[in-house]
Every structure is written in C-alpha cells, then in structure tokens.
Amino acid sequence: MKEEYIQIMEEYQDMPLRDVVFHTLRKSILRGHLKPDERLMEIKLSEELGVSRTPIREAIRMLQLEGLVVNVPRKGTTVAKITEKDLKEVLELREGLENFAVGLAAERITEDQIKVLYENAKVFEEQVRNNKTDDAEYILELAKTDEKFHALICEATGNSRLVQMMNNISDQIYRYRVEYLRDGESRKKLSEEHIELCESLKNKNADRAVELMSRHIEKQKEHILSSVVGKID
C-alpha cells in the first residue's frame, strides 16, 4: 500500500502537505485501495505516508466533511460505506455531464484533439484484442485508457470547471468502471462505440455525438447497477 500512496502523493507534490495527504487518502478511497468500513489509523497512515500525525488528522477531518469517512463508536474512523442511492446519484450525474460535454466538444474540438482521440481509441481497440480477462493489471490498463478517452472529450470543451467536475465523478466511479471492463463482450462493444464517437466528433455532428454518448453511458450504468445491487448497503 505504501507504494500506491507514494505514487499518488507525487501528483500533488506542489500543494501544502495537508492537501497532499487529503488528496492521497481521498483518491485511495475513491479508487478502492482503502475499502468501505476499513479503519483509518493515524499512526499507521503516518508511517506509510512518511508524514507526522498532524496533517493526517487534518486530512481526515476534511474527508469527514465530504462524507468519505465516518466516526464509528468503539471502532474509530472508518471509510464510509457507499449506498445504492449514492451510486445511482453519481451515475446519473455522470450521464448528464458526459452528454453535455460531448455536445460541446463537437462544436469546439480541434483537428489535433481529434487525432489524439483517435489514437486513444486505437490503443483501446488493441488492448481489447489482447483479451487477458483474468489479468488484473490488464483490466487496470483498460480502465486507464477508457478514462483517458472520456477525459480527452471533456478537455476538448475548453471548459475548465467542467473538466474539474468530470475528474471528480471519474474518481468516484473508477472501481465500478473496472468491474464493467471485466466482461469481454462489454469491452468489444465499448471499443466500437469509442470509434463511433470519434467519427461523430470529427464530423462536428453534436446531435449524433450526444445520442451515441447517451447510449454508451446508459449501458454502463445499467451494468454497474445490476452488478453491485445487493453488494452494497
């Protein structure tokens, strides 16, 4: 776990230490490294992150304000459990933001951005062709490429606030995106849809792009909800 923390901390190295610790723990929770109901012990975290207990304590307070951790009597501070309602709300918000983003991107995307998007779609297509379903690292690489595809579309809008909101949502659904990508048929369909989205954006066809994205996200939403209902509180 220490190595994962170090990798995440490097992303935020220009921030004050308290914020570095906060973002590191936050991403670890949202990405599933820290599991729901897992205890957050200050001494252990201090040793693993290589910092004093003060920024750990401050970061935990910030996480409590976001509802990501809770204080449990006789147990201490633990990672908050996700509810079915929480998950549905996040997925609904993602659907709305993705549809808005792709419509805006169709109007604003540049030729260079289209080229990069196609390159990403081709990388994903090649990864899908390799088909290593039982390889955990392979699934994580797929998730990273898929996440980047959607990030590129959002960046093409030129709207920094939208990018920030999408990054937040992307973090929150990351663990469920991974589960979706374990299914071979879903991966193939996803790859085909990425190419179709590239075509619609290249042609500046906003209506078609929104239609494709809506279908693309709706399928994922249905799969994610059906796969986790009954496994969460």
Image: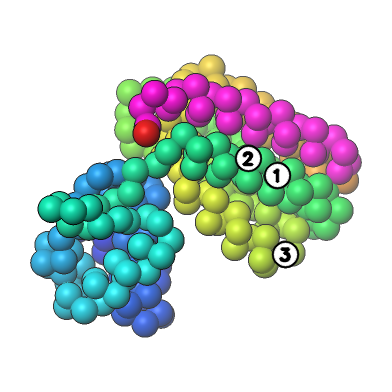
Residue 182 appearing in the image: no
Label 3's element?
loop
Residue in view at x 85 percent, y 35 percent: 208
> x and y percent of residue 169 in the render?
54, 51
Q: CB under 8 Å between callouts 1 and 2? A: yes
Looking at the picture, tell me which residue is in the foreground, 172 or 138: 172
Between 135 and 163, the one nearer to me in the picture: 163
Answer few, some or many: residues within 10 Å of disc 1's Cα (few below 14, many 20 plus, some between 14 and 19). Answer: few
Which is the main secondary structure of the residues drawn in magenta?
helix
Q: Quadrant of residue 230?
A: top left
What's under tag 3, amino acid-wise? Asn
At label 1, the amino acid type is Gly
Q: Is residue 6 left or right of residue 94?
A: left
- Does dot 2 land on a helix, a strand or a loop? helix
The residue that label 2 is drawn on is 92
Judged left or right of residue 211, residue 31 is left
Above or below 90: residue 135: above
Task: Kindly check if marks 3 and 1 are in contact, taking CB atoms under 8 A apart as contact.
Answer: no
The range drawn in magenta is 205-232
At horizontal 73% and vertical 51% (from top left) the residue drawn is 101
- Say whether disc 2 or disc 3 marks the residue closer to the N-terminus: 2
Q: What whole-number distance in Å separates the C-alpha atoms at marks 3 and 1?
A: 15 Å
Cβ atoms at labels 2 and 3 below 8 Å apart: no
**135 is higher (above) or lower (below) than 66:** above
**Alpha-carbon neighbours of circle 3 within 10 Å: few (<14), some, or many (≥20)?**
few
Determine whether 181 is above or below 4 in the image: above
Which amino acid is tagged 2? Glu
Front residue of 163 and 82:
82
- The residue tagged 3 is 159
Q: In the rendered view, would you say 13 is above or below 88?
A: below
Residue that mark 1 sits on:
96
Name the residue located 78 percent from the left edge and 52 percent from the top edge: 105
